[in-house]
Image (tube, grey):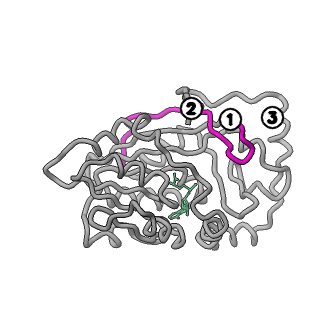
Amino acid sequence: MGSEKSLSEPRLLTDEENRKLEHQKITLSELKISLLQKEAAKNWDKFYKNNTTKFFKDRHWLLREFQPLQILLASSEHTIYFLEVGCGVGNAFFPLMEAAGSSVFGLACDFSSRAVDFVRQNEQFNTNRMFAFTCDIVQESIIDKLRVITSGIDIMTVLFVLSALDPNEMQRALKNLADVMKCGGKVCVRDYAVNDYAMIRFGTRNHKISDRFYVRQDNTKAYFFFMEELEALFRDAGFKTESLCYKEAKTENREKQLSVDRYFVQAVFEKL
Ligand SMILES: C[S@@+](CC[C@H](N)C(=O)[O-])C[C@H]1O[C@@H](n2cnc3c(N)ncnc32)[C@H](O)[C@@H]1O
């Protein structure tokens, strides 16, 4: 990730982009939409079958962008419990655990069992200080799955995961995250923002599920957030906002060897 700019408003669209958005019609049947919701884990599992560990780049920028993650570097008498939610194959988990001090215990979960297997098979995976587990954050209680290890998480990362959920599932997922957080614990979030270029690029038919919510060719889904709605979701789940902004970032498209502008929402929330 190259240079990044913080913004307080969403990106403005050009006339051409507005026209493209207007042409995106909801043509998917209700049956197809409910199937996408039912088969979400299966579709992400297929994604990891096809792409293995090669799709996402390691996220080495996290410590720079999220000040609260510095807690991982400090030495502490107590164990610091860190959870990466929707960890995929560990592109955020391993760089953070590599930098983390010996008092940190790292937990990683995803609802794709294939992704969790990739995490466990990674040569950096160390069972003395790491635990990876399958969990559907909408359907299953995280705290139940972690009960033998800890009753509370100090710091959590939720990166490009909420956008994969249906909007009607988000509140349930966030309550689940809140249940496993210690009071004062921090959640670091980055996700897709409204008017991101990827949102405009969706085709005119068979991609749009609802407002700012789309399905990709591979049947995985992407929601594009206003930062105020992200804040409201976390507030309703029992968090207060520590920081919140839009981010303009240059990312590299490896396949096309291009550097592209992307727009994200970025936030830190504290459990009350
Ligand atoms: C775009 S990937 C991000 C992976 C990782 N956080 C990163 O930054 O590299 C989204 C991940 O969220 C996971 N995911 C989506 N919905 C989930 C759910 N309901 N419960 C748990 N994981 C989920 C997917 O399997 C996928 O690995």
Q: Between disc 1 and disc 3, whose residue precedes?
A: 3
Q: Label 2 belongs to which residue?
A: 2
Q: Identify residue type, mark 2.
A: Gly
Q: Is residue 238 above or below residue 197?
A: below
Q: Identify residue type, mark 1.
A: Ser
Label 1 sits on a secondary structure element that is strand
Depth order, front residue of 191/46: 46
The overriding secondary structure of the stretch rendered in magenta is strand
Q: Residue at x 37, y 51 (%)?
A: 156
Q: Residue at x 71, y 41 (%)?
A: 257
Q: CA distance from mark 2 to mark 3?
A: 28 Å
Q: Identify residue type, mark 3.
A: Asn
User: Percent x, y for residue 19?
Assistant: 85, 36
Q: Quadrant of the N terminus?
A: top right
Q: Is residue 12 above or below residue 260?
A: above
| 242 is within the stretch colored magenta | yes
Q: Label 1 belongs to which residue?
A: 259
Q: Residue at x 23, y 41 (%)?
A: 74
The answer to whether marks 1 and 3 mark residues whose Cβ atoms lie closer than 8 Å is: no
Q: Label 3 belongs to which residue?
A: 18
Label 3 sits on a secondary structure element that is helix
Would you call the spot at circle 2 few (<14 residues within 10 Å), some (14-19), or many (20 or more)?
A: few
User: Percent x, y for residue 171?
Assistant: 49, 57
